[in-house]
Amino acid sequence: MTGAGQNAPPGPAACARLIDEAFATYNYHFRTVTQRAAGRFASCDWHGSQRDAVQRIELYDRAVNRLVRRLRSLLGDAATERERWVAAKASYRQRTRNYLDRAFHETFFNSVTRRIFGTVGVDPEVEFTEAQELADEAPKHSAIIRSHRYRGSVWSLMEECLRAFPFQLEWDNFSGSVDRTVAAIEAAMAQQGERYALQGVEFLRPVFYRDYRAYLIGRMVGPRADTPLVIAIKHGDRGLLVDGIISDRKELSILIGFARSYLHVDLDPVRDAVLFLKSLLPAKPIGEVFTALGRAKQGKTERFRTLISHLKNTGDRFVDAAYDKGMVMIVFTPTDQPVILKVIRDRFSSSKTVARREVEERYRLVFKHDRAGRLVDAQEFRGLKFKRLRFSDDVLDELAREAKKTVRFEDDYVILDHVYVERQLTPLNVFLQQASESEQRRAVLDYGQAIRDLATSNIFPGDLLLKNFGVTRHCRVIFYDYDELCRVTDCNFREMPQAQTMEEEMGSPDWYYVAENDVFPEQFLNFLGLKDELATLFRDAHGELLTAGYWRDIKERILAGEVFEILPYRRPAYQYATQPGDTP
């Protein structure tokens, strides 16, 4: 029987057409939501921007689920006929062969067939497994790139560049914004030395939006190398103004990093923008670039393909990645790739009160939440399959003992039914043991700033132990242990009760009632394990984090609808030296 009554089930070509049309519909809705960003920015509708971010993330799985239900209804018992899907793949390849962003279409096809077949591992007969080869350098004549020649005046060049972008609002002291941009470019040119001669500037035509800012992303073109040039624009008192300039690869990498929420930018095609960004950030994995642009599923695909290619071409194995054994997760890593894999344990330590379902919910919360540059992007995978010989004996033993609910062993293979994959970081407690004194001080200060940034984005880490934070290659402190994470607005921040009677003072330390969501900030420092001088540094710089009043104030402001600014770049001091009407 089929689910289509008397009608014959759709053939391979029809299945390919349905998938192609479903992706086109999804992509239309993705771009529609993305295109709202310009209006949200113009009207300062920050809450609307947050809703759009969540809605756009949810579109992909909804599109796949809707299509899978339809295909199963149309195909009935024929839904899992392999021959039909092998032929459908060939037909789909033919249909999409000239698409510039063909990789997106192929990933969507894979999502559908994996859902229909419940695929474990990779099934090349009904999946596209070949990575799309990208050029080694960014396109020079793409339609999404606007070029401006340098004709002797940097000021005139930047005036031309800024006026080329069609913002819906007027500028607040336009000449002041040009001055700031020119100062940044001249500083970057000076750092390059006499060998650098500015030839021009190129910008991606679409404007990038996130939070309170619009970003113009481009590069300064020179005879030997191109230098990033990103202009951050915000609302001033009377219009738009340039708030910051990024001309450093490290700062650009942080702007579009794995701890940031996705950018909203309407790209067609996406491929040329990815190549452009990759040319400026050659060390950044291609999957992270796709993810930063909101194409999270393609980012996952590229990350997985990179890992599989690495394992195929090396003798690398998964080894224990945890400096301190996790009480909730088993963590392992390939020895020569900057990623970690995390599998939830069957049973948690007795000190943990959370359940598996709650842990998964918290990872989903982070996936959809504003990560504020302080939460690592944890990508969720199902049905991964690796050869047993790719695991160290210690990891195999721990998986077999502690993760029977999500790990299976079949013949010579290990099957991970559910796993999270993240960028590997150096745990903060380990970093502090290895770093110089100045590096330790910077890390502790940034640790406090990370807690502040999380708080104002409505995230309380739950467990502030140093081992739950990591340090990136750019020396930023990021939180990555989500099993006790919660919203600030769900917490009750309290001062420690003071004993009122001799019996209370002399009695057991738990003489007062503590609810599940009660938090006592003044106790934080007692459990962090910072040595004395670093504890003093933390208290001097971030002492208000140790007060319940600070946290209650943040909570009340969030509940009142305030949206906090968390800048992903540093403002140069010189840029505020004065133009009347400017607001820092």
Image (cartoon, rainbow, N blue to C red):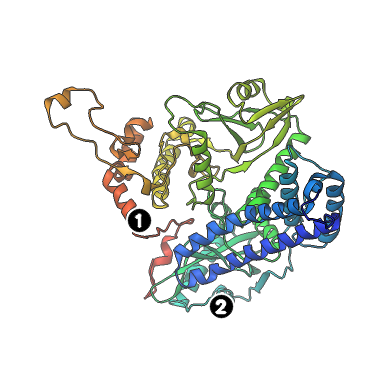
Q: Give how far apart the Cα atoms at labels 2 and 1 are.
A: 39 Å
Question: Compared with residue 441, is residue 251 higher up or lower down, i.e. above or below?
Answer: below
> Please, what secondary structure does the residue beneath circle 1 have?
helix
Q: Classify residue 8 by image quadrant.
A: bottom right
Residue 182: image location, x then y, percent: 52, 69
Q: Residue at x 74, y 34 (%)?
A: 311
Residue 324: image location, x then y, percent: 50, 27
189 sits left or right of 508 in the view: right
Question: Compared with residue 168, is residue 570 higher up or lower down, i.e. above or below?
Answer: above
Q: Is residue 197 visible?
A: no
Name the amino acid, label 1.
Leu
Mark 1 Cα-neighbour bin, 10 Å: few <14, some 14–19, many ≥20: few
Question: Compared with residue 236, is residue 540 higher up or lower down, i.e. above or below?
Answer: above
Q: Residue at x 42, y 58 (%)?
A: 565
Q: How many marks?
A: 2
Mark 2 Cα-neighbour bin, 10 Å: few <14, some 14–19, many ≥20: few
Would you name the residue on which mark 1 appears?
559
Would you name the residue on which mark 2 appears?
163
Q: Residue at x 51, y 30 (%)?
A: 328
